[in-house]
Amino acid sequence: MLTQTLEEGRKLTDEALERLLPAANVRPVSIHQAMRHSVFAGGKRIRPILCMEAGRAIAGSLPAGIEELGGALEMLHTYSLIHDDLPALDNDDLRRGRPTSHKVFGEAIAILAGDALQTQAYEVLSRLKCSADARVKIIEEIARGTGTVNGMIGGQVVDLEAERTKPDAETLEYIHRSKTAALITASVVTGGVYANASAAQVENLRRFAQAIGLAFQIVDDILDVTQTSEQLGKTAGKDIASEKATYPALFGLEQSRKKARALLENAYEGVQSLGPKGETLKSLARFLIERES
């Protein structure tokens, strides 16, 4: 069942992205080729799938047009990866098993490709097939989740500033909750908003997403030291080499695994009120915590 959910979610997302992104032969071709190079490099499409399944859990069936919201979220996620891989930040040559954007197109086009994906995402969000009130809430939620205050950019800044230091547990959690969990949280919450979730349902979805978002990054940290580059589709061990702040570095592997499992239980509690309609979200949470790549 979960395998089917993941496959259908990927397919819906890729079809939406194909419709929403400029074709590779549209002028100027260099930027559109760079955008598509990174967007269609693969990836699990976790954020769009979480968004769509949150919408399904609230509405009882997949809300019409929600895949375009998922596509916009994937554009924003991909923009963050392009910029994260740049020499000025993590300086990585491999992403999703392919050469990173700046290795193929050069730094200038890579920077602009990330910028363009972010811009394109907000154009898509402005046209979502939901009420005007819902669109505004969705845009606000995503802008906050990718911003500087407890959002993705803020987390990236603190992560950079923490390099070659040994941050305390509070700083490490701030980095992970902001850099990774904030966009995951926005994905789940906006899926619920798109499906007309009540205020109480939105807060339950937020609790669920905040827990799995932090657990997702803890598992990423674990995999970075236990898996190969081929298994991960990106350079393994870079966090160790650059002395980045990670859960295994601070707490060790076993304590990190315990923390991820405890967060999974918190996530379950967040969607308990949904009853059977929350089972797919629980399965997705378990998949994210138990994955090996």
Image (spheres, rainbow, N blue to C red):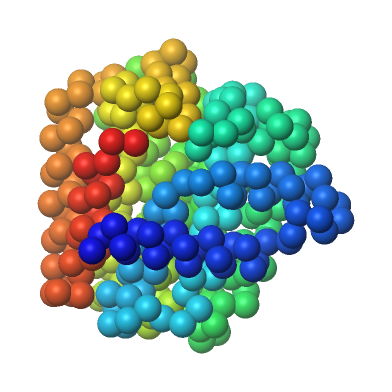
Name the residue at 13% across, 35% down: 258
Q: Is 52 located above or below residue 131 in the figure?
A: above
Q: How many numbered circles are shown?
A: 0
Q: Is 189 located above or below residue 165 in the figure?
A: below
Name the residue at 39% across, 65% down: 8
Name the residue at 27% across, 41% down: 291
Residue 167 visible in the displayed image:
no
Q: In the orientation shown, which residue stands out farthest toward the right?
A: 27
Give the quarter of the image for residue 254: top left
Tell me residue 125's x, y (percent): 59, 70
Q: Is 208 located above or below residue 107 in the figure?
A: below
Quadrant for the C terminus, please: top left
Q: Is 264 located above or below residue 87 in the figure?
A: below
Residue 83 in the figure: left or right of residue 275: right
Residue 143 in the figure: left or right of residue 118: left
Tell me residue 202's x, y (percent): 31, 71
Quadrant for the N terminus, please: bottom left
Name the residue at 77% across, 39% down: 109
Q: Nearer the viewer, residue 4 or 85?
A: 4
Tell me residue 148's x, y (percent): 53, 47
Residue 102 visible in the displayed image:
yes
Q: Nearer the viewer, residue 212 or 98?
A: 98
Give the quarter of the image for residue 267: bottom left
